[in-house]
Structures are given as structure tokens and as C-alpha cells.
Image (tube, rainbow, N blue to C red):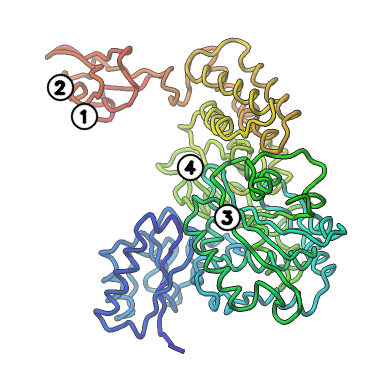
Amino acid sequence: MQIYRAHVLICGGTGCTSSGSENVKKEFEEQLKKHHLENEVQIVGTGCFGLCARGPVVVVYPEGAMYTMVRVEDVEEIVTEHLLKGRMVRRLLAGGQEAGDVTQSLDKVDFFKKQLRIALRNCGIINPEDIDEYIAFDGYKALTKVLTEMTPEQVIDTVKRSGLRGRGGAGFPTGLKWEFAARQQNETKYVCCNADEGDPGAFMDRSVLEGDPHSVIEAMIIAGYAIGAHQGFIYVRAEYPIAVKRLEIAIGQAKEYGLLGKNILGTGFAFDLELRLGAGAFVCGEETALMTSIEGHRGEPRPRPPFPAVKGLWGKPTILNNVETFANIPRIILNGAEWFAGIGTERSKGTKVFAMGGKINNTGLLEVPMGTTLREVIYDIGGGIPGGKKFKAAQTGGPSGGCIPASHIDTPIEYDTLVQLGSMMGSGGLIVMDEDTCMVDIARYFLDFTVDESCGKCPPCRIGTKRMLEILERITGGKGEEGDIEKLETLAKNIKASALCALGQSAPNPVLSTLRYFRDEYEAHVKEKRCPAGVCKAMMKYVINADSCKSCGICAKNCPVGAIEGEKKVPYRIDQDKCIKCGTCMEKCPFKAIFKNV
């Protein structure tokens, strides 16, 4: 076996790939050959490290130096300075690391200091397309333990005692769900993995599949053994080509190693796994709609009960968990229920993965113990708000969640506290908003998404959310009427009480939470025809200050619709009927004579 003195890990997740990491990798290969280092230094393509805002990311071991925003032209310097001379390239090091310290570690990077990576433990560490690297990091060791040392009942008991709750949104106890399915007297049962992940801004499950697909495969085999199932399905959206490719490779490798199929590890237990590609319908994130889609039908939810653990795929007992939930299982089996239960809070055990985006410096993927405060996530890990702006709110749980205001920034992030605040954990999307965000427009944005993605099966969701959206569009369009706010509240409560599935029932959450904490903004829109944040264009005007205008004509030359006119020595004017509120005039004016009137 080839022994290397150094390893160069290059992120191959979707974010870094879109930033050019493949070209960086090729340049490393060429530079290593140029300097005759190809037999001393190994290049490893990995999954997402998490620090997406600073990609492409490259980590050099054994030092553990993390280089960020690496360009093709930076590669030769890293090779000659670091790999040849042992001197780290200071200007490229991630925040928290120092070039003079030869004992670098990812734990020294500011972004990772407060994280605890369990579901993400191998992401960015191993080559996801090499099963041997997964095995080297205790991969399939949990499966071996389960099949040779534990009964199905013991597996379920371990998962129950761990306190693991579903990471897909509802937070239902995982072990209890498995127990319900195990109790069913049926020779045919199924295990399903929800990798559909349709929330705007969410990329948690995608990143796990891209960086550590075998962890999910191993967990699904364990689940099959626990409930008595011999067939599994991973439902992943076709919009995740890298994840699909790596899953296909991983499944093929697992079959080649005798870890999938008949007589696994010589124990007589059989389990097989297939992929099912989704077309990108948000509703297929709902478990019964997902199963209907796997069966080959239009993805629409079914009434419950009966629940899938009793009657799921093709009418057979079925358990369904999302990617993150499964990714925790092998470590729980290996480290014990008490270990996992000792992390987090009393009612929310373990860690939670979040995809953090919006108005935040460190856009990316993170995993923290349950109970970590929103402040710690936003400022200690996220690096705060760009431009020194004030934090205004955070939206958790995707379109089904709600907005948490700045007054609750010290709230511990856990299932129950988020629900009390009018939001929810959801699958882990976290959108950060600053002082320039219009909360009415945010509610409109998420409801527009929900209306577009509604399957249309039940009238409360199909019709009710559409009526809500029409009111919000009227309000943000400067045509709000007295009574609109009350109509919104009434519609929202009726939809929550009567929609068929959880997605429909939670669709009004963004509206209800913004009404709860930012009602004054709604009232300003309706009563004063004013958007306090200056976002809603219909209520906004760009005005030229006559005293500051130098009549240079730069604004008129740059206006894309010819809405500005004037003449020498006379202040220019903006025709409000023609103005499209693009802001180009204010941006181009060298004398700061144009301002936005909100």
C-alpha cells in the first residue's frame, strides 16, 4: 500500500464544485507532477467541509491547515511553500488558524469551535467514493455489531433510549417509530429514506449524501434488521446529481463487499437497496406523498391514520426517516444510547445540522448540540451580519417554519422552544435576516413558494393559501385595505386546522409568526402605505435632492427606462410613473443627491 507524507483534501461538494474546485484539483495534480511530489502527496476529493461561503476549500494534512477561497493561481504557491518548504500560506488560512503554528487543527477554525459533528463526522474527511475510507473510520462496524451481537429488540431499545428524534421536521421519536413497524405481523416491510429536501435554502441532506453516503446505507440496513424489512428505498431528488452519483457508487460498492444483498456478513440476513429519483415536488417531502411517488403515482398525501408504520408502501408496514436521522444511527450503536442522550437538552437529544444562509457572513453547513443559542450560531459560528448591520430575525423550518425576532436571539435551539416561539425545527434550514429585511415581503415570499408547490388535493391548502397570497400581494403592492390583516389571521387559523397534511397545516406559519412579532410592519403597509424597510417597490420613491443636484446628467444616462430628465443648471427630476425603482440612479450619483423615500 502506498504511504504518503501529506494529503491534500479538496472539497467536492456542490457549493465548492460550483466555485471551481474541480479546476483547483486538476491544477494540484499538475503542480505535484511538476515538482515531482505525486508519489509523496495524495490528493483526496471529499464532500462538503461546511464553510460554503469561503469555497473552494482545501485542507492539507498532517498539519490540518484549512485554506479557503483557493483559486487555480493559488495552487502553485501552496505546493511550493507548504508542501515543499513547510511554510503555510498565511493569506489563505481560515479564520482562527495561524501560519506560524505547525499543529493546526480544524478545531482552531472559528467556524468549527462550537460545533459537534456527528451526522457530519466524515464530511470533508473521507473520499465518499471509496468504501475503504469509510471502513477505516469505523464504517459498517455498527452493522457488524448489530448483526452478530444484538437482537432486533435490543437495537430498537438502544435507539429509543438515545432520545433520537426525527430530523426531518416533526421530531417524532425514531425508536418509537421503528417499534411500531416491528410489531406489525407482516412478512413484507420496507425502509425508506427521505432525501427529497425541498425547502428553499436547505442543503443538509444533500451534503451528507455527497460527503458520506455509506453512513446512510449502513443505518438503513440496521433499520431493516430492527423491524424485519429486507428492502429499502432512498428517495432523492434528481436535482442533486452529485449526491445521486455518489449514492450509486456507494450502493454498488456495498453490494460488492457483501454488505447489501443476501446473507450479509454471513449472518443469513438479507437487505437490498434501490434509488428512486424525485422530480422536485416539495409535497413529496411529506412521508405519504413520498411513498405514493415511489409507487409510481402522482405525489399526493394520504389521510392518517393508518400511519406508514402500519400501512405504508404498497400497503405494507414502512418506516421513513430523513438522511440526517439515519446518519446518527451508526454512532449511537457504537457509542451507546447514554452517550447520545448526554448531548443536547432534556427533551432534545444529540446535535442538529443547519444550512445557514441569508444575511450572514459564513454561509454554510454546521452541526451543533441541541440547546445552542441562536446568538452563538449567528455570531460565533456564522460570523455575524455583513456590513455591521443589525440582526432582525431568523427563519427556521423552511416554508413550514416561522420567524424568530432579535428579542429571542438567546433562545436555546430545540424542538419545544422553537414551537413555543411560533416556529419549528424543520429539517434544518436557517435563513438570517438583517435590519433591511421587510417581514411582510418575507411572509409573501414563503407563501408564494407554498402556493406554487401545493399538490392541490385539499381545498384549505389549494384555495386558502392562494387567498392569503393575494392579500399579501395587495399589501406589499401598496393596495392594502382595512381588515386585510384580520382576514389573513382568520384564513391562517382555518388552514392550520383543516388542511390534509402537515405541509398544508404549517403553510401559514411564516405569516402567523411575522404577524405575532412584526405586526407594526403590516400596519405601516396597510394604513400608511409605507414599507419601513424600503423593500416593497410599490411604496417606494427615488427622489433627487434639488439642493445637492449638480445637473451633471449621470443619473439620466444610466437610467434604463429614461425616467430621469433635466437640463443644465436646473436640478434633474424623476418621473415616478416611468421609474421602475431599480436604484441605479442612486448608485451612480457621485454627489449622493438621490435618496430612497420610504
Q: Does the CB distance between marks 3 and 4 fall below 8 Å?
A: no
Q: Is residue 222 left or right of residue 123?
A: right
Q: Name which residue lies at 28% across and 28% down.
A: 584
For the residue carrying disc 3, how many other residues have a C-alpha within 10 Å: few (<14), some (14-19), or many (20+)? many
Left or right of 421 in this view: 242: left
What residue do we see at 69% from left, 47% from top?
A: 287
Quadrant of residue 560 in the image?
top left
Tell me how far mark 1 sits from mark 4, CA to CA: 30 Å
Residue assigned mark 3: 205
Judged left or right of residue 379, residue 101 is: left
Q: Secondary structure at mark 4?
A: strand
Closer to us: 371 or 273? 273
Q: Which residue type does callout 2 highlight?
A: Cys
Check residue 552 in the rendering and tell me which mark sits there, or answer none: 2
The three-letter code of the residue at mark 3 reads Asp
State the residue position of label 4: 358
In the rendered image, which quarter is residue 400 located in?
top right
Q: Earlier in the sequence, mark 2 or mark 3?
A: 3
Residue where numbered disc 1 is placed? 590
How far separated are the C-alphas under marks 2 and 4?
37 Å
What numbered label is drawn on residue 431?
Answer: none
Residue 28 on image: x %, y %? 31, 72
